[in-house]
Image: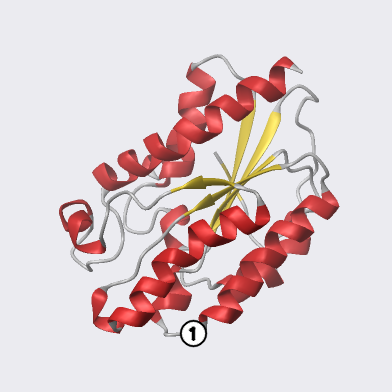
Amino acid sequence: MTPSSPQAPAPVDDVATASLRILFLGDSITAGYGIDQADAFPARVETRLSEAGYSVTGIDAGVSGDTSTGGLNRLDWMLQNRVDILVLELGGNDGLRGIDLSLTRSNLGAIIEQTRESWPGVEVVLVGMRVPPNLGRDYTEEFASMYPEIAEACQTHFVPFIAESFEEVMDYVQNDGIHPTEEGHAIIAEKVGNVVEPLVKRMQAD
């Protein structure tokens, strides 16, 4: 798993043409907050694909505390190198801060659009999220429904939240009540991998 930092120079694209580049653009969940990065879901997905015989390079562009606005602001830098698959996991911090979800929708849509403009043929996988119920029922429900609606409107692939409700994942989060444990990341990796692997298989067969 290749980490990425918006402060560093853009990396040279020295990956073999046959190798697919998977950009994991996200926040502290993607970054593996509180656990070893090797146990975070992006690294687990890359390992799964490599062990299955696929030639892939995962780029972990997770930044703790990042919002959808932050992700959009650093996107140009991330798109300097080829992106074959974008796994987009952003918006959770928007929800925790009570940000107007119309802005979150707009930002996520812009990230998808700009990635497609820069790299036609890219496959986009949107990861669904939820926020704690203390933010109010209306906001919580609108937040949860936002992701499948964006996926449908933007015609992306979609990975639902790992359970039907936020409360159902409490056994898989750290003591802060937010960030996944290693077991939680394993569950996320399985769900993301189940969507990404068929894309990789098809793309490398073309």
Residue 103 location (% of width, % of height): 60, 80
What residue appears at the point 77 percent right and 18 percent down from the top-left corner? 206
Examine the rendered structure and indicate whether residue 86 appears above or below residue 67: above
Residue 69 location (% of width, % of height): 62, 75
Amino acid at the residue labelled 1: Ile
Q: Is residue 192 visible?
A: yes
Residue 61 location (% of width, % of height): 59, 54
Examine the rendered structure and indicate whether residue 115 appears above or below residue 119: below
The image quadrant that residue 13 belongs to is top right
Q: Would residue 161 appear left or right of 159 to someone viewing this image?
A: left
What residue appears at the point 50 percent right and 16 percent down from the top-left corner? 52
Q: Farthest left residue?
A: 171
**Mark 1, other Cα within 10 Å: few <14 / some 14–19 / many ≥20:** some
Assign the N terminus to one quadrant of the image: top right
Q: Nearer the viewer, residue 146 or 131?
A: 146
Disc 1: which residue: 99
The image quadrant that residue 140 belongs to is bottom left
What residue appears at the point 32 percent right and 51 percent down from the top-left corner? 35
Residue 48 location (% of width, % of height): 46, 25
Q: Would residue 19 appear left or right of 105 to someone viewing this image?
A: right
Q: Nearer the viewer, residue 192 or 47?
A: 192
What residue appears at the point 75 percent right and 30 percent down from the top-left corner? 15
Q: Secondary structure at mark 1?
A: loop
